[in-house]
Amino acid sequence: MRFKSLLTVAMLVAFSGMALADDDYNELKQQGYKDWKVTTIKKDFTGCKKGEVIKFDNGMSFKCSENEDHEVKDGNKVTILRHPSTGMCRVFIGDEDYEGQLMGIK
């Protein structure tokens, strides 16, 4: 019985994490952010390490300003949102929103 309860809680946490990532994306879209660029990462992505630079396949790169583990398989999607009036960008790698600095903006 206890195992079932723990399993249920673990599943709820996992599914709520996916929903939160979707909520972040949808919330930004409601705030006026638009899909700006879509690219991929060639190598496996295991998360952001503060100060690490991640190279995107479109020639842009992203410098992480936080430490956050999140496994994304080879070639996974990178979506960059941009606010049309402020020019601010938000980066999603896989389904996770990361804080940092975009470099090589064209």
Image (spheres, rainbow, N blue to C red):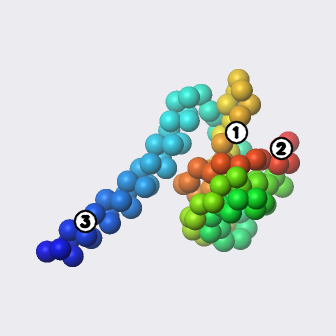
The residue where tag 2 is placed is 105
In the displayed structure, would residue 80 be above or below residue 53?
above
What is the C-alpha distance between the residues marked 3 and 1?
36 Å
Q: Amino acid at mark 1?
A: Cys
Say whether residue 22 is left or right of residue 73. Answer: left
Q: Is residue 76 visible?
A: no
Tell me the kind of residue under disc 2.
Ile
Position in image of residue 2 (x %, y %)? 17, 74
Local packing at callout 2 (Cα closer than 10 Å; few below 14, some 14-19, many 20+) is few
| Residue 6 as seen in the image, left or right of residue 56 | left
**Residue at (63% x, 60% y) in the render:** 67
Circles 2, 1 touching at the beta carbon (< 8 Å): yes
Q: Secondary structure at mark 3?
A: helix
At horizontal 86% and vertical 48% (from top left) the residue drawn is 104
Query: Residue at 36% across / 59% down in the picture?
Result: 13
Reading the chain from its start, which is encountered first: label 2 or label 1?
Answer: 1
Circle 3 residue:
8
Residue 73 — which label?
none
Task: Tell me the distance, in whole angstroms, between the alpha carbons under discs 2 and 3.
Answer: 44 Å
User: Could you tell me residue 54's position as x and y percent?
Assistant: 75, 61
**Is residue 61 among what the camera can see?**
yes
SS assignment at label 2: loop
Residue that carries the numbered disc 1 in the rendered image: 89
Q: Nearer the viewer, residue 89 or 58?
A: 89
For this rendering, which residue is in front, 80 or 1?
A: 1
Give SS at disc 1.
strand
